[in-house]
Amino acid sequence: MTASPSVASQSTTRLDGQLGTRSIVFMVIAAAAPLTVIGGNVPLAVGSGNGAGAPIGFALAAIILLLFSVGFVTMTPFVKEAGAFFSYVTAGLGSRLGLGTAFTALVAYTAIQVGVYGYMGWAVGDLVTYFGGPDLPWWLYSFAAMAIVAVLGYRHIDLSARVLGVALALEILVVVVLDIVIFATGGDSGIAMQTFDPATVFTPGIGVAVLFALTGFIGFEATAVFRDEARTPEKTIPRATYIAVIVIGVFYAVSCWALITGVGANNAVAVAQKTLAGNGNLLLDTATQYLGPIMRDVIQVLLVTSLFACVLSFHNVIARYQFSLANKGVLPAALGRRHTRHHSPSVSSIVQTITAAVVLAVLALSGLDPLVGVFGSMAGVATVGMVILMLLTSVAVFFFFLRRPALAEGHAWGARVFPVLAVLGLIIAMWLVLSNFTLVTGGSVAVSTALALVPVVALLLGIVLGARLRLDGGAAIDADAEAPPA
């Protein structure tokens, strides 16, 4: 079965917009939820990982993603569809693996979005009670946030970009200010140079640090998801990809180093472990010490806006995945319709809201803790899914150019060398993720194994269905496009 929209129908089945590099970078970094990572993933990486050496774990994760990005960007000019990873895999490895990739992406992004809704419900509840408000169930706040996301997701993407841009700018600004003050004052006992000592970095805990760093990068493929809404996608997507990975990686690593410097390298593990035990907060307590109680309150509020920006970004990504799959005949055609006034994937957006609401309701009714039970388990599913997606995409890039040597001329590094390096790095990353998986999910080995298999099952289901549905990979290829400079 092949389903490609006719030229006449593309006005209602193709999205459009004028997003520039800055707007797309906002979308991607917002999905990474930088303040959430600094407040949550950093204590985990320090307290459960390699202590003062944790910033290097974030740097290593960024390097792995940069290796991946070179091949991804090299192939981007030849992929005309806005399906992100699944379009690349379809073009490079065929429709079966392409559809499997699409299903894996839907599961991974749905999981992390629902997980963040759980985290957000807890964060809003904590904020309300901190300021003397009523102690209400966390899921009430989660569903309230979901309603707002539903409205923004239904409308034109430019509105979401503006909302994300404001929230993102504020949360990054306040952490940068904290970093500067800590380094300017010398921290607790001088700049923590132990961070760069190989004896500190390369301990068994380095795997845990890399694991939580990778979790913080989930969502960066959104650069390609917004292809149809980009002003000049051939230039915008490569720029946005590199900028997003570098900015996120540097921000995470430097901010992690700053917090370690702030509390002292020798005290960092103990302080982080207190945070994990619920007896303190590494980020908020450090902010109080160096910026004062008012800025602590500001950061606590911005944590909520960070989480909101995150779920809004994931909502937009999932809606566009469904929209693209519907126009290929994989999902119901209604999901592939564009709103006549907002030019948004409105039907897909509504369905995505309903899906997230159902999953979140099941988890809430199960009585799970919003952080460990909901966020932890869903983040674990998403992390495994993300690594699978990038692995398949790197392999697809290699074989895409192997079968089209003329397109690879002058671009051997991006077409052949970097995809291989990315595959090797991602295999190591997958091993690190799976060998420390119970730390992410907070569950038993049996529960963690079941969760890790969820994206694998989605991949296999897509492959099986791909035997019956033939996705038109050729339609995604533009052989006349020029690859970026070597």
Image (tube, helix red, strand yellow):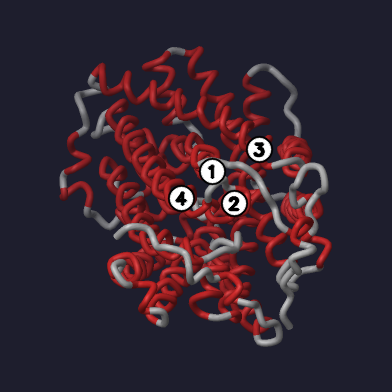
For mark 1, does the 10 Å Cα neighbourhood hold few (<14), some (14 to 19), or many (20 or more) residues?
A: many
Tell me the SS state at disc 2. loop
Q: Which corner quadrant of the image does residue 94 belong to?
A: bottom right
Q: Where does label 1 land, which residue? A: 24
Residue that carries the numbered disc 4 in the rendered image: 235
Image side of residue 448 versus residue 240, left or right: right
Secondary element at tag 1: helix
Identify the residue at image location x=81%, y=66%: 333
C-alpha distance separating marks 2 and 3: 11 Å
Give the mark nearest the N terminus, 4 or 2.
Answer: 2
> Amino acid under label 4?
Lys
Mark 3 highlights which residue? 158
Q: Secondary structure at mark 3?
A: helix
Name which residue lies at 48% across and 60% down.
438
The circle drawn on residue 226 is: 2
Q: Which amino acid type is shown beneath numbered disc 1? A: Ile
Q: Secondary structure at mark 4?
A: helix
**Residue 449 visible in rendering:** no
Q: Which residue appears at 44% of the width and 12% of the height?
A: 292
Residue 108 at x, y percent in the picture: 59, 60
Q: Earlier in the sequence, mark 3 or mark 4?
A: 3
Q: Position of residue 54 (x, y in %)?
A: 31, 45
